[in-house]
Image (tube, rainbow, N blue to C red):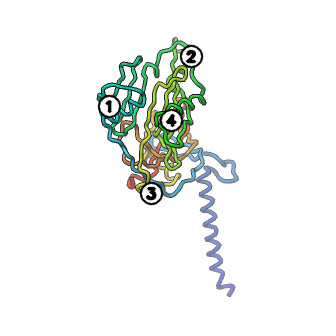
Amino acid sequence: MAKKSTPILLLLAALVIIVIVSIYLSSVYLSGGIPGSANVGSPVIVSTGSGTVYRISAPMPTVNETYPVYRTVTPVVTENYVRKIAKNFSLEGEVSTMGSGILLIKDTAKEPEERVEVFQNSGGFRYTIPDKMFPTVDHQPNLPSDDEAKVIAETYCSGRGLLSEGECFDNVSVCFRQGAWDAGKEISSYNVTLAAQCRQTIDDLPTVGGTTTVYIGEAGEVVGVTKTSREREENPVRYSSIISPEQAIEELAAGTDVITPLGGNYDNVTITNISLAYWIEPLASSQEYVYPVYVFSGTAEGKGESYPVSRYLWAIPSAKR
């Protein structure tokens, strides 16, 4: 009996070895190095046909097998719709056409002039006081702190119904900086206006491109608001499977399904963060569905300089979009 069971035992042992080797190779690929060796944590290096080398120094994100796809709800942008938005900012005036698909109200009775531009393809808008958003200054304006700017933006938008429940401003950056140069050397630099940003979220994922941005100038005055977030149906139209992070890396290097091309000539791109988000098209573009994308963030290097860079790749294959 013992001799007859030997082939079965050998087969079981071989299967165990195969499983162990598979787990081992997976850990090597995901970590970028061999466990227990000097390579632990070293980046996965992926070359592209263009000569750019991607160094993946980010952990693989944990993702679900499927994600909801939503249909957008785009308002019909009529003259009355534009006037309703303008009224939020106490603007009055005639509605005119500005370029293709943009309706405009300029309130020339105000000094300086104020305006609202509404985009027909998205229903989004841009309110500005141009002379106060981009003024010429010879001193550092009195700008609020980042925390103060968040409060100013939230108070301003809440009073005008521009924020949904639970939304908040969590990022502040310089919108407009003015500098003076002499013989190629910067001799002065002033931060002129700030941008406080509230990013739209969908099913607990952030969006790329869906924001409410409030522009703040001298003494905390709000000098502009841009709303690029999209309305959507409450329930998803379907759930769709997505590609794995590992496959996304391969497609990034191959240039497959990449939404934005990599501008400039870079030798190396080091990816330090990989995440998922929902993609929102720009203000002037139409959009029927909202799909998830992979977001690759890091640093691009070329010609002796480095720049922060983000690349976006569709998480749902084109055949399913």
- In the structure shown, which secondary structural element does the residue marked by tag 2 occupy? loop
- In the structure shown, which secondary structural element does the residue marked by tag 1 occupy? strand
Looking at the picture, how far across and down is residue 248, in whole percent?
49, 50
- In the structure shown, which secondary structural element does the residue marked by tag 3 occupy? strand
N-terminal-most mark, 3 or 1: 1
Numbered disc total: 4
**Closer to the observer: label 4 or label 3?**
4
N-terminal-most mark, 4 or 1: 1
Q: What is the three-letter code of the residue carrying label 4?
A: Ser
* Viewer-nearest residue: 174 or 107: 107
State the residue position of label 3: 239
Distance between mark 4 and mark 1 Cα atoms: 25 Å
Q: What is the three-letter code of the residue carrying label 3?
A: Tyr
Looking at the picture, how far across and down is residue 321, in whole percent?
39, 52
State the residue position of label 4: 158
**Closer to the observer: label 2 or label 4?**
4
Distance between mark 3 and mark 1 Cα atoms: 36 Å
* Residue count near mark 4 (Cα–Cα under 10 Å), binned few <14, some 14–19, many ≥20: some
Distance between mark 2 and mark 4 Cα atoms: 29 Å
**Closer to the observer: label 3 or label 1?**
1
N-terminal-most mark, 2 or 1: 1
Looking at the picture, how far across and down is residue 312, in whole percent?
47, 43
N-terminal-most mark, 2 or 3: 2
N-terminal-most mark, 2 or 4: 2
Q: Is residue 209 above or below residue 117?
A: below
State the residue position of label 2: 140
* Residue count near mark 3 (Cα–Cα under 10 Å), binned few <14, some 14–19, many ≥20: few
Q: What is the three-letter code of the residue carrying label 1?
A: Leu
Q: Is residue 24 above or below residue 159?
A: below
Distance between mark 4 and mark 3 Cα atoms: 33 Å
State the residue position of label 1: 103
